[in-house]
C-alpha cells in the first residue's frame, strides 16, 4: 500500500461503516402501481430481517469497491516474487478467450458431437504438453499441482501392482517441494528423505544407499527448490530404473526449462505441470488451478479416464475404455477455463516464444542474484536457474530476521518473497522474479532489498516494527489459518486480528 492510500485512510478511519439513511444510488420515477415493502415478501425466506443495510449513493459504492481493490496487492499492481510459485503476469488475451461464450457457457454434460471445439482444444493442449515435456501422453484432469502429484503416485502404484510388485517406500529429495512428501504420505507410502550434497543437488551415491526392491519411486523437483538444476538426473533415473523403481518429476518449475530441456528425455517417468504457474493461468486466493500429468509410454495405460482422443475420422471423443486406468479423479473433465487460458498462451507464444520465456526467467533471477549478492548471504554458490535463495545470516547479526525483511518490503509497497522455505536453508528468502518483470521493476525490488539490508544495521527496531503502512501489521499466522475471520461485521475491531508472528520455522 502506498503512502497516499494510507493518508486517505487516516482521513476516513471507518472501513465499512458508510452511508446515511435515505441515501440511494438510483432515482426512479414515482411508482404507477401500489407500493409494497419487499421485506413482506422476502420475509418468508429470510432468517433475520433486512434492517441495517447501508444506504449509499452511487459514487460512495463505487469508491468503496475501488478502495478495497487498491488495498489489495496483485501481479497486476507490481512484482510478486514468491519463489516456487511463479507468479508471472497473466495476459488478458487469455481471459478474453476463456470468456468466449462457446467455451464459458458450455454444459459439461453436452454430448461429444456438440462439444467438438472444447474437446479439440483439450486434445491439442494434451499434445502440446506432451511435446513440451517429452512424454508419451498427458491427462488434464488434476485440479492443482498437489492433485497432479497424487495422480502421479496413484499411477506409480498401479504400475507396480500390475507387475505384482509391492513397493511401500517413496524416496523424496530434501530439496523437493513440501507437497511431495505430503502427497507420498497421503498416498500411503512411507516417506524416506534423501539428503542433498553441499552444492545443493542430489548425489547418486546418497541415493544408492536407499535403493532396494521396496522402493516405488523417487520424487524430485527439478530445478529444485533452491533453483538449482539436478545435474545428475540422468544417472539417478538410470539407477532407479535398474532397481525396478520409477522417477517422479515435480514439474511446477518448468518455467526454467521451457523449450530448452525435456524432462521425459532425462528419464523422468511421470510429471505434473502447473498450468497456473508456468502457463499463465491465474492463481492465488484459492482460485482454480490445473495440474496436468504427463507420463512415459509404459505408464500410459494407467492414466485417469476419460482420455480425450482423436478418432480416425478427425473428430474428438472422451474415451472411457482403459482397463488399467486408475479411474476418474475430478468431477467432469477438469478445470476447463484453465485449459482455454493455457492453450491461448501456448498458441500465442509458439515454440520460439516458450524458449524465450525460460531464457528471460533465468536471466531475471540471475540479475537479481548479482544485484543482491553483496547484501544477503547466499547459502549455495552453485549457479541457479529461475529463482534464487538467500538467507538472513548477515542481518541476524543485529537481530533482524527474514520475517522482518519481508514485513519491511511491504512498507516499500512490494510483495515479499517466499520466506522460511526451502527448509534446508535457515531463514530462507526465496526469490523468483519471473520473466514478465522489466529491468526497472527488478532494479526497484533490488533497491528496496538493499535499503532493508542497510537498515538492519542502522535501525533494526524499525524493521521489527514493520510494516507500518497496512491496516494490520503482523498477524498471528497460526490463528489466522485455524480461525480465519473472513467476514466484516459492524464495529469489528481490526486490532483483534493482530497477534504475535509465528514464523514457519
Ligand atoms: C506450487 C508447487 C507445487 C504444488 O502446486 P499446487 O497447485 O499449489 O498444489 C508443487 N511443487 C512445486 C515445486 C511447486 O512450486
Image (cartoon, rainbow, N blue to C red):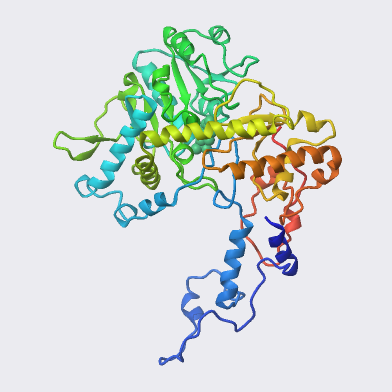
Q: Residue furthest left?
A: 313
* Residue in the foreground of this view, choosing between 456 and 32: 456
Q: In which quarter of the image is residue 476?
A: top right
Whether 38 is drawn above or below 337: the answer is below
Residue 23 picture location, percent across and down: 59, 82
From the viewer's perspective, tell me whether residue 302 is left or right of residue 501.
left
Whether 163 is drawn above or below 154: the answer is above
Residue 422 picture location, percent across and down: 63, 28
Residue 65 picture location, percent across and down: 57, 65
* Residue in the foreground of this view, choosing between 207 and 159: 207
Residue 294 picture location, percent across and down: 38, 28
From the viewer's perspective, tell me whether residue 114 is left or right of residue 184.
left
Image quarter hosting the C terminus:
top right
In this orientation, does residue 287 appear? yes
Q: Residue furthest front?
A: 439
Q: In which quarter of the image is residue 486?
A: bottom right
Residue at image location 69% in from the left, 56% down from the top: 2
Amino acid at each position: 500500500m502506498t503512502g497516499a492510500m494510507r493518508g486517505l485512510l487516516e482521513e476516513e478511519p471507518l472501513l465499512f461503516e458508510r452511508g446515511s439513511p435515505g441515501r440511494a444510488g438510483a432515482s426512479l420515477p414515482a411508482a404507477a402501481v401500489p407500493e409494497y415493502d419487499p421485506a413482506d415478501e422476502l420475509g418468508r425466506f429470510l432468517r433475520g430481517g433486512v434492517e441495517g443495510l447501508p444506504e449509499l449513493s452511487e459514487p460512495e459504492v463505487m469508491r468503496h469497491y475501488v478502495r478495497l481493490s487498491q488495498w489489495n496487492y496483485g501481479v497486476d499492481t507490481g512484482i510478486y516474487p514468491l519463489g516456487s510459485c511463479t507468479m508471472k503476469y497473466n495476459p488478458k488475451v487469455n481471459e478474453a478467450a476463456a470468456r468466449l461464450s462457446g467455451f464459458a457457457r458450455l454444459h459439461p454434460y453436452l454430448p461429444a458431437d456438440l462439444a467438438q471445439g472444447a474437446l479439440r482444444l483439450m486434445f491439442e493442449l494434451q499434445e502440446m504438453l506432451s511435446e513440451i515435456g517429452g512424454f508419451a501422453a498427458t491427462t488434464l484432469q488434476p485440479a492443482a499441482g498437489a492433485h497432479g502429484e497424487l495422480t502421479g503416485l496413484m499411477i506409480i502404484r498401479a504400475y507396480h501392482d500390475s507387475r505384482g510388485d509391492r513397493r511401500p517406500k517413496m524416496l523424496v529429495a530434501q530439496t523437493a517441494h513440501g507437497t511431495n512428501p505430503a502427497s507420498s504420505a497421503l498416498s500411503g507410502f512411507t516417506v524416506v528423505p534423501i539428503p542433498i550434497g553441499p552444492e545443493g543437488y542430489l548425489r547418486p551415491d546418497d541415493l544408492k544407499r536407499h535403493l532396494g526392491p521396496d522402493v516405488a519411486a523417487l520424487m524430485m523437483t527439478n530445478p529444485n527448490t533452491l533453483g538449482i538444476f539436478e545435474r545428475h538426473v540422468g544417472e539417478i533415473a538410470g539407477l532407479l530404473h535398474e532397481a525396478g523403481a520409477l522417477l517422479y518429476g515435480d514439474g511446477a518449475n518448468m518455467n526454467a526449462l521451457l523449450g530448452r530441456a525435456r524432462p521425459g528425455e532425462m528419464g523422468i517417468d511421470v510429471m505434473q505441470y502447473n498450468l497456473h504457474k508456468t502457463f499463465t493461468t491465474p492463481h492465488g486466493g484459492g482460485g482454480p488451478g490445473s495440474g496436468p500429468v504427463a507420463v512415459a509410454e509404459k505408464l500410459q495405460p494407467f492414466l485417469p479416464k476419460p482420455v480425450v482422443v482423436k478418432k480416425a475420422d478427425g473428430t474428438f471423443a472422451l474415451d472411457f475404455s482403459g482397463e488399467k486406468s486408475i479411474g476418474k479423479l475430478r468431477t467432469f473433465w477438469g478445470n476447463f477455463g484453465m485449459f482455454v487460458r493455457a492453450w491461448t498462451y501456448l498458441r500465442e507464444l509458439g515454440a520460439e516464444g516458450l524458449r524465450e520465456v525460460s531464457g528471460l526467467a533465468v536471466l531475471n533471477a540471475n540479475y537479481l542474484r548479482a544485484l543482491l549478492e553483496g547484501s544477503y548471504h547466499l547459502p549455495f554458490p552453485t549457479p541457479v536457474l529461475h529463482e534464487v535463495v538467500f538467507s538472513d545470516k548477515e542481518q541476524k547479526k543485529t537481530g533482524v530476521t527474514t520475517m522482518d525483511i519481508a514485513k519491511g518490503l511491504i512498507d516499500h509497497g512490494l510483495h515479499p518473497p517466499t520466506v522460511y522455505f526451502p527448509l534446508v536453508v535457515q531463514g530462507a528468502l526465496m526469490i523468483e522474479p519471473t520473466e514478465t518483470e522489466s529491468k526497472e521493476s527488478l532494479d526497484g525490488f533490488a533497491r528496496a532489498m538493499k535499503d532493508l539490508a542497510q537498515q538492519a544495521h542502522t535501525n533494526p527496531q524499525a524493521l521489527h516494527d514493520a510494516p507500518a503502512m497496512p491496516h494490520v501489521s503482523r498477524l498471528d499466522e497460526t490463528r489466522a489459518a485455524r480461525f480465519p475471520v473472513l467476514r466484516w461485521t459492524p464495529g469489528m475491531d481490526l486490532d483483534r486480528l493482530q497477534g504475535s508472528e509465528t514464523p514457519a520455522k
